[in-house]
């Protein structure tokens, strides 16, 4: 019979820091993936973290993230290039536009086409789809072609309406809270349509109608409903929701990027003169920084207020550069290819971008996208919807509770408290296990493959947040032994490999110390699993508790 009073049970609590699996130093290239053709499109992220990216290999690829290289989930082969960034509907459907005037709806799990529609077929006006789709609050997919048509497509694949404006366009539409649709065109006009496809107003930039005044970029919308768009004449324009000019800011060359807007309605954008600008809500320069040749890659703002952008530095090399709030450069990473793709940030802070060499690059950063700002990036959010969405992100009041099980045991990971979450994407060592509608995940019967770090991407209509990391460990044999002549209970715990592991004991779950814990041995069973044997002294006839802490 085992004596009473030393340890009644082992309680794994006390996660220190959120962390993430497999992170490197900021600016490090974590992995690359070869799409097979030049990449103009920007990556789009599903709620479960799946990465969707089109290329000039005429394919759209779905990649499942892991702690290392991503795993290809599926590849959809189109009939022509895919330069447009995908948009994701509320049910997860992936909408992709192609160079042959086609919009296709893809099943997110299989990559099979649910439907496709030839845009302009009914009107006899076919055009290239270079601008990315946007999605209204009611689920209408808005897409523009070079034939001078704006199409509204129902989620079932039928056309609801079209608007003919008679000019080439590669601008991607932006949608405000009232479902008004804004887009630019090569004729130098910024147009506003209502959700029924009727023109509400148009705004002509200086020199509209001339090639030098075309609008290639996509509009952005701030927290007050003002619209920002750049033009080939070198100006960034600020227009109110009624189409009236507020101000314009001059640069020496064309402004072809999609501006980003922060919480104070400061605007970040680049000019073809090679400079990144920050301009105030009043149209005054806050700061600028010369980089090199900037094409169409737009800036992005992270949750710490850092701004990232790419530029071409010559001799075949582009650079991803990070700026701290206020405009101080923090780091640069070289990529030996031209980049036109715009950056996206995963919820746990990995930058993704495509390049002309056909590769998608994953680069370490410090934080995920800031969903609290009006317009953080090209297409506004990670799902590529191009729409202003009001509401709050999910809140994680209490993180995942760690789980310790005997071999073959079954248990459940769950949250202490979370609010506003609609879906929960469960990850083990960075790899998505599945998505649930409830904040819990069953583990077991426990095997070595289950001993790992776990976290959850919690999402709702607004965006995603990542939970602090927790772990599943295995409790092995318990036995009595003498340690330095003192009777002690020895226990074996198998846990994820981590240099920051520490054990503490307590008799009251309030006061924790390390004096009573002796690590007898610790060794790696594999590259991922560490076995630690610990011993604790006798406490008399009292309950005792053990806590394991770690730093992911």
Image (tube, rainbow, N blue to C red):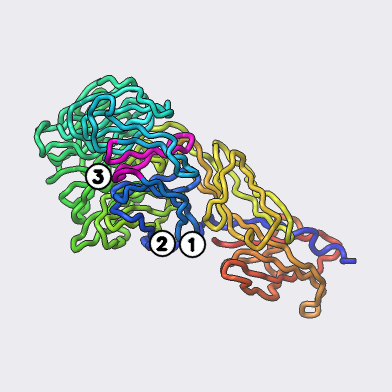
Q: Left or right: where does residue 528 sit relative to residue 275?
A: right
Residue 314 image position (x, y, % from top left): 18, 61
Using the numbered discs, state the Cα–Cα distance from disc 3 to disc 1 in whole angstroms: 32 Å
Residue at numbered disc 1: 22
Which residue was labeled with disc 3? 269
- Camera sees residue 43: no
Q: As displayed, is residue 126 above or below residue 331? A: above
The residue beneath circle 2 is 30
Nearer the camera: disc 2 or disc 3: 2
Quadrant of the snapshot with the N terminus: bottom right
Quick check: marks 2 and 1 in contact, CB under 8 Å?
Answer: yes
The reply to whether callout 3 and callout 1 are in contact (CB within 8 Å) is no
Magenta stretch in the rendered image: 78-101
Tally the numbered discs. 3
Up/down of 539 relative to 251, above or below:
below
| Rendering quarter of residue 257 | top left
> Whole-Å distance between the Cαs marked 2 and 3?
27 Å
Identify which residue, 378 or 75, lies in the foreground. Answer: 75
């Amino acid at each position: 019979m085992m004596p009473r009073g030393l340890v009644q049970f082992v309680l794994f609590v006390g996660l220190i820091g959120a962390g993430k699996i497999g992170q490197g130093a900021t600016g490090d290239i974590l992995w690359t993936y070869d799409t097979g053709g030049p990449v103009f499109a920007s990556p789009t992220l599903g709620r479960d973290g799946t990465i969707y990216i089109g290329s000039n290999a005429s394919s759209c690829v779905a990649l499942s993230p892991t702690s290392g290289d991503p795993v290809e989930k599926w590849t959809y082969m189109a009939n022509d290039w895919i330069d447009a960034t995908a948009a994701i509907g509320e049910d997860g459907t992936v909408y992709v536009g192609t160079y042959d005037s086609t919009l296709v709806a893809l099943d997110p799990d299989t990559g099979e086409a649910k439907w496709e529609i030839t845009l302009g077929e009914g009107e006899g006006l076919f055009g290239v789809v270079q601008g990315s789709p946007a999605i209204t609050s009611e689920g209408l997919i808005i897409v523009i072609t070079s034939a001078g048509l704006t199409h509204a497509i129902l989620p079932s694949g039928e056309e609801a309406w079209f608007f003919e404006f008679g000019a080439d366009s590669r601008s991607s539409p932006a949608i405000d809270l009232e479902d008004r649709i804004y887009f630019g065109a090569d004729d130098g006009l910024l147009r506003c349509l209502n959700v029924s496809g009727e023109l509400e107003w148009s705004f002509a930039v200086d020199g509209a109608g001339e090639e030098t005044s075309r609008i290639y970029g996509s509009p952005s919308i701030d927290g007050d409903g003002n619209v920002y768009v750049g033009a080939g004449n070198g100006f960034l324009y600020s227009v109110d929701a009624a189409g009236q000019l507020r101000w314009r800011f001059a640069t020496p060359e064309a402004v072809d990027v999609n501006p980003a807007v922060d919480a104070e309605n400061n605007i970040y954008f680049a000019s073809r003169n090679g400079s990144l600008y920050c301009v105030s809500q009043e149209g005054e320069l806050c700061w600028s920084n010369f980089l090199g040749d900037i094409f169409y890659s737009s800036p992005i703002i992270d949750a710490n207020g850092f701004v990232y952008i790419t530029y071409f530095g010559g001799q075949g090399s582009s650079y991803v550069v990070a700026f701290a709030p206020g405009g101080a450069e923090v780091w640069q990473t070289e990529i030996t290819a031209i980049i036109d793709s715009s950056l996206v940030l995963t919820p746990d802070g990995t930058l993704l971008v495509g390049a002309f060499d056909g590769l998608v690059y994953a680069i370490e950063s410090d934080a995920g996208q800031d969903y609290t700002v009006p317009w953080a990036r090209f297409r506004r959010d990670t799902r590529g919807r191009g729409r202003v969405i009001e509401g709050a992100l999910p809140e994680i009041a209490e993180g995942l509770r760690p789980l310790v099980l005997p071999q073959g045991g079954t248990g459940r990971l769950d949250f202490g408290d979370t609010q506003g979450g609609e879906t929960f994407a469960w990850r083990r060592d960075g790899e998505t296990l599945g998505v649930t509608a409830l904040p819990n995940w069953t583990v077991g019967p426990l095997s070595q493959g289950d001993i790992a770090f776990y976290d959850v991407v919690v999402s709702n209509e607004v965006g995603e947040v990542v939970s602090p990391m927790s772990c599943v460990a295995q409790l092995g044999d318990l036995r009595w032994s003498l340690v330095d002549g003192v009777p002690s209970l020895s226990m074996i715990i198998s846990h994820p490999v981590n240099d920051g592991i520490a054990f503490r004991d307590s008799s009251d779950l309030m006061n924790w110390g390390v004096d009573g814990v002796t690590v007898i041995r610790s060794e790696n069973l594999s590259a991922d699993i560490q076995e630690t044997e610990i011993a604790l002294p006798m406490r008399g006839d009292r309950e005792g508790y053990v806590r394991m802490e770690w730093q992911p």
